[in-house]
């Protein structure tokens, strides 16, 4: 059996509910930082990362996935059509608090979300450099452009979850907000477990996609 893979999400898979639907076996590990890349919306209208100068970085969430979930991600990200390509890169991992570390993403969502699970502030764990972390990026679509309207909403839900998990607000303003406008829901702190009318079953069924493939990592 293949060993679990570590995967860095920097786009709409920051949203825990979406990640739990796409990858029902995934677990949350913590915050990740990838050096020497910058965030963009490419000409397909989705998030991408491109090589950049020395002081640029990508911040996101690191999940642990199995081979089944990796195949689901390959489908969602359009690997077969070259919408995204897979790379294995060194990522600095800031491990999640003990109440969240290696928790199944579907479990966090089912318990009512991040704030419910994290009952108290917990001491940070020193970061570690993890090699060969899976990252999806496009090598063919690398021009800055405008996001698709449906993707703005998904990104803002992901940003809200990532903020509650500790993603740096300065990074969000500097890297993501030039491309993704703030929505009313994100301004009010909407996050996993506090939305109404959107709860779905998480334990079975095919991966849910908005687009056929390549709809944002």
Image (cartoon, rainbow, N blue to C red):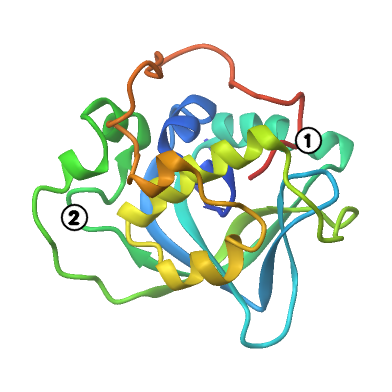
Give the residue at x 32% y 55%: 165
In the rendering, at what x and y percent does residue 188 appear?
A: 33, 45
Query: Label 2 neighbourhood size at 10 Å, few (<14), some (14-19), many (20+)?
Result: some
198 is higher (above) or lower (below) than 149? above
Res 208 quadrant in image: top right
18 is higher (above) or lower (below) than 161? above
Give the residue at x 64% y 38%: 151
In the rendering, at what x and y percent does residue 26 appear?
A: 43, 37
Give the residue at x 37% y 56%: 163
Q: Which residue is mark 2?
A: 98
**Relative to 208, 130 lies left or right:** left
**Relative to 80, 2 lies left or right:** left
Quadrant in the picture for the C terminus: top right
Say which of 87 and 184 sits in front.
184
In the rendering, at what x and y percent does residue 39 appear?
A: 66, 64
| Sequence-first tag of 2 and 1 | 1
**Relative to 103, 213 lies left or right:** right
Say which of 23 and 200 sits in front.
200
Give the residue at x 64% y 24%: 209
In the rendering, at what x and y percent does residue 92 appear?
A: 47, 72
Mark 1 lies on a secondary structure that is: loop
Q: Visible in this render: residue 91?
A: no
Q: Residue furthest front?
A: 184
Q: CA distance from mark 2 to mark 1?
A: 34 Å
128 is higher (above) or lower (below) than 132? below
212 is higher (above) or lower (below) than 84? above
Q: Which residue is mark 1?
A: 78
CB atoms of marks 2 and 1 within 8 Å: no
Query: Label 1 neighbourhood size at 10 Å, few (<14), some (14-19), many (20+)?
Result: some
* Total numbered circles: 2
């Amino acid at each position: 059996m293949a060993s679990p893979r570590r995967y860095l999400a920097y786009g709409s898979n920051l949203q825990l509910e979406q990640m739990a639907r796409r990858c029902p076996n995934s677990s949350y590990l913590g915050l990740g930082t990838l050096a020497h890349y910058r965030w963009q919306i490419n000409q397909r209208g989705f998030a991408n990362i491109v090589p950049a100068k020395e002081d640029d970085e990508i911040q996101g969430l690191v999940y642990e996935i199995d081979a089944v979930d990796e195949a689901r991600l390959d489908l969602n990200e359009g690997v077969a059509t070259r919408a995204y390509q897979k790379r294995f890169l060194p990522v600095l991992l800031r491990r999640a608090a003990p109440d969240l570390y290696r928790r199944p993403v579907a479990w966090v969502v089912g318990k009512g979300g991040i704030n419910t699970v994290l009952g108290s502030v917990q001491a940070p764990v020193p970061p570690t450099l993890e090699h060969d972390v899976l990252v999806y990026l496009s090598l063919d679509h690398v021009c800055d452009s405008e996001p698709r309207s449906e993707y703005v909403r998904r990104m803002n839900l992901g940003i809200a979850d990532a903020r509650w998990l500790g993603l740096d607000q300065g990074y969000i303003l500097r890297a993501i907000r030039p491309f993704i406008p703030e929505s009313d829901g994100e301004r009010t702190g909407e996050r996993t477990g506090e939305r109404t009318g959107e709860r779905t079953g998480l334990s079975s069924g095919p991966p849910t996609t908005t687009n056929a493939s390549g709809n944002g990592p």
